[in-house]
Image (cartoon, rainbow, N blue to C red):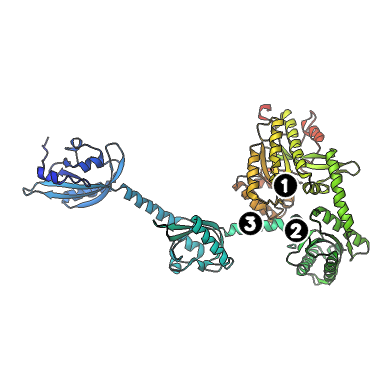
């Protein structure tokens, strides 16, 4: 073994620099063994001096060391050239670190060559560089647009996605303010509020309507963050945004389909009723009066028969245009279907003013219409007016009174106006409440059950509980005859408790027979926001000893929560007490998208009016397909209501719908009929009732 070339003691003392790791290797011997390391080298590597002297100067290298760097090092040693490079090395304990090595050749007077290495741990620097490289890669390659401004809000950097989304090249915006994208849809107060939030919280998130370079609309979901220095001063703002234009337009399109009559552009029945309820509630504070005008065209059928349905539709569109022209901005105008139109006039003060408006409507409607085929036609209308100043009047009672008055006008000779008797309307509401209360207490209100089909297994997995009034004189009456009275009166909470108990009782009976089925019940805003249904759920769950969900709490899309966060919290709590949550009548009002995305839902139930033409109309086919895709993206199951034909069911299967309900599957039935149809020995339903796993 070749003896190590010793260094002069004076030199080794000189090399003991505390902050700098130094090693010296014998440059004349193969493998360049180490002849000296200082204490700083020991601290850096974890090796004692006596463990490394005589070992190759490359002993710190490992499998992770870059072969290209090793080759550069060899070439420098061979040529005697100084070199500085960064290597990944390994300490004595096996941990890796980035070692910045500066190696140079030292030749003594006698011509003996040593290799002197100066080393330091630069791991933090390398990590910072790699993080910087990663950040730069993200900045350049992300699909979200990014812009950076200085403290005075002038743009100093943008990423490629910014150019792709806005159309502005980076050079066009540097030094300018972000308001060059402004669409003018937001006022100065919006931006002041936005930056006040950034100042207070450090960031702001929301949607901004901007404009691309070519003038087209750009709706962005944006997060603006403030970057502060060590003194807490804002030095930069960073805006990160993504293009949600198409999503927002699709949402608006869905909401419009759900709220408006597709032919005339007027409100549809469902949305009109929702808005009318709100106007009636406001009477408690305004007491200015509200009138409903119910219009039915006289002799409209001959127009369709003589000139065709296309001409009839064109006539309805023109009548709608005239009605829009006559109405004020705060009036509500709807087409209820066919040739029926309804108008709500708020703040008129007296019924006589409503009569004057109705007369103007008639005077305009009777003017001749030129049809698409060049023919001229005339129609008239019969108008019924119901007027109230009482906020506790239900929309159903007001519409029924106006409808009845309209028929009176027709009987008087058509093209006339008839008024509903205000006393009759008042007494009707009061008397009906008393009668419904008596019916509820006497057990005349009962539940009918309509099956829900799981399309993945063709089994009945649940029933919707639908309230019916078994009237001793009029027979079985639907909910339109009493449900508004219940939900707008002191009966609301007792009715909700009864609903949940009845659902639990039926679910328990079904399980006793070995079947797994959830029972869905519609809960009102009052029942949810008061939290009364939580107590009822807990009581029912313990009464019937349920360990798994037994009920589906169905929230009507038309429900207008005063506090959406509170409603979300209460519905989330309901899940702990054996309930799933469904959004009912989706597609019938403007709250659909908001509720579908924010409420803790398990199921979205698509309204029957949206499903009606899914098999025959391409627009409805695409609409329902979009709802199903949206529901699945939000991890909700989608249930289609109102299935009446095999063609509808087949189309929904192809679209990936999860659940179905409607007359094709089975009609609503009393419990005795349900038992006979699904539980008796002679039962042979089209679709079987799902059995409990233990009963299979």
User: Please, is residue 491 above or below residue 408 in the view?
Assistant: above
The residue wearing badge 1 is 526
Quick check: 688 above or below 69?
Answer: above
Q: Measuring 76% from the left and 69% from the top, which residue is drawn there? A: 325
Evaluate if marks 3 and 1 touch, with contact meaning CB atoms under 8 Å apart. Answer: no
Question: How many numbered badges does the structure rendering display?
Answer: 3
Residue 80 at least partly seen: yes
Q: Is label 2 or label 1 in front?
A: 2
Q: Would you name the residue on which mark 3 appears?
A: 251
Q: Earlier in the sequence, mark 3 or mark 2?
A: 3
Res. 70 mark? none
Alpha-carbon span between mark 3 and mark 1: 28 Å
Please name the residue shown 60% across and 47% down the image.
634
Q: CA distance from mark 2 to mark 1?
A: 20 Å
Question: Which quadrant, please, contains the C terminus?
Answer: top right
- The residue sitting at 84% across, 43% down in the picture is 437
Kind of element beneath mark 3: helix
Instruction: Please provide percent x and percent y for residue 120.
Output: 25, 47
Say left or right for 630 vs 293: left
Q: Position of residue 374 (x, y in %)?
A: 80, 72
């Amino acid at each position: 073994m070749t003896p190590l070339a010793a260094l002069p003691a004076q030199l080794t003392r000189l090399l003991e620099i505390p902050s700098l790791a130094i090693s010296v290797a014998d440059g004349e011997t193969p493998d360049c063994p180490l002849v000296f390391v200082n204490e700083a080298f020991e601290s850096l590597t974890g090796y004692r001096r006596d463990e490394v002297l005589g070992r190759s100067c490359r002993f710190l290298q490992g499998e992770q060391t870059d072969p290209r760097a090793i080759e550069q090092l060899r070439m420098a040693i061979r040529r005697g050239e100084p070199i500085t490079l960064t290597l990944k090395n390994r300490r004595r304990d096996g941990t890796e670190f980035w070692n910045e090595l500066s190696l140079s050749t030292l030749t003594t007077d006698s011509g003996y060559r040593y290799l002197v290495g100066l080393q330091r741990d630069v791991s933090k620097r390398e990590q910072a560089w790699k993080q910087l490289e990663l950040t730069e890669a993200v900045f350049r390659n992300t699909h979200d647009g990014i812009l950076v401004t200085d403290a005075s809000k002038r743009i100093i950097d943008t990423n490629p996605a910014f150019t792709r989304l806005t159309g502005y090249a980076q050079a066009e915006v540097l030094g300018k303010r972000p308001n060059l994208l402004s669409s003018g849809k937001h006022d100065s107060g919006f931006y002041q509020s936005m930056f006040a939030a950034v100042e207070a919280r450090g960031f702001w998130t929301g949607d901004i309507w901007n404009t691309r370079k070519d003038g087209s609309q750009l709706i962005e979901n944006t997060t603006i963050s403030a970057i502060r220095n060590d003194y807490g001063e804002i030095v930069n703002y960073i805006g990160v945004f993504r293009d949600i234009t198409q999503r927002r337009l699709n949402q608006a399109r869905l909401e419009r389909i759900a709220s408006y009559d597709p032919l005339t552009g007027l409100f549809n029945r469902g949305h009109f009723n929702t808005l009318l309820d709100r106007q009636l509630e406001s009477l408690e504070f305004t007491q200015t009066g509200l009138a409903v005008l119910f219009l039915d065209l006289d002799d409209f059928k001959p127009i369709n028969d003589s000139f065709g349905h296309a001409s009839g539709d064109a006539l309805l569109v023109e009548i709608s245009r005239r009605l829009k022209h006559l109405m004020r901005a705060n009036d509500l105008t709807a087409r209820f279907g066919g040739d029926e139109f309804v108008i709500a006039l708020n703040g008129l003060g007296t019924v006589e003013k409503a009569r004057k408006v109705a007369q103007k409507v008639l005077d305009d409607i009777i003017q001749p219409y030129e049809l698409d085929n060049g023919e001229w036609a005339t129609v008239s209308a019969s108008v019924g007016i119901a007027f109230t100043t009482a906020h506790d009047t239900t929309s159903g009672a007001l519409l029924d009174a106006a409808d009845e008055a309209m028929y009176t006008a027709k009987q008087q000779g058509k093209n006339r106006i008839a008024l509903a008797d205000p006393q009759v309307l008042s007494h009707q509401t009061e008397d009906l409440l008393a009668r419904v209360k008596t019916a509820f207490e006497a057990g005349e209100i009962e539940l009918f059950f309509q099956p829900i089909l799981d399309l993945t297994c063709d089994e009945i997995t649940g029933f919707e509980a639908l309230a019916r009034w078994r009237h001793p004189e009029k027979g079985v009456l639907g909910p339109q005859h009493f449900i508004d009275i219940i939900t707008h009166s002191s009966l609301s909470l007792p009715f909700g408790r009864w609903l949940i108990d009845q659902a639990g009782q039926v679910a328990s009976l079904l399980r006793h027979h070995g079947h797994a089925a959830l029972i869905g019940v519609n809960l009102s805003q009052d029942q949810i926001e008061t939290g009364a249904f939580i107590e009822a759920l807990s009581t029912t769950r313990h009464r019937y000893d349920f360990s798994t969900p037994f009920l589906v709490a169905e929230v009507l899309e038309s429900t207008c929560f005063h506090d959406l966060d509170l409603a979300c919290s209460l519905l989330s709590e309901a899940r702990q007490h054996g309930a799933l949550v469904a959004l009912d009548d989706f597609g019938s009002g403007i709250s659909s998208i908001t509720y579908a995305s924010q409420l803790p839902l398990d199921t979205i139930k698509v309204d029957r009016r949206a499903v009606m033409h899914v098999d025959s109309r391409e627009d409805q086919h695409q609409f329902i397909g979009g709802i199903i895709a949206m529901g699945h993206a939000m991890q909700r199951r989608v249930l289609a209501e109102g299935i009446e034909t095999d063609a509808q069911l087949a189309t929904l299967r192809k679209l990936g719908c999860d659940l179905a309900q409607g007359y094709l599957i089975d009609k609503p039935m009393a419990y005795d009929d349900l038992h006979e149809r699904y539980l008796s020995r002679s039962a042979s339903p089209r679709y079987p009732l799902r059995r409990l796993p233990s009963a299979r």
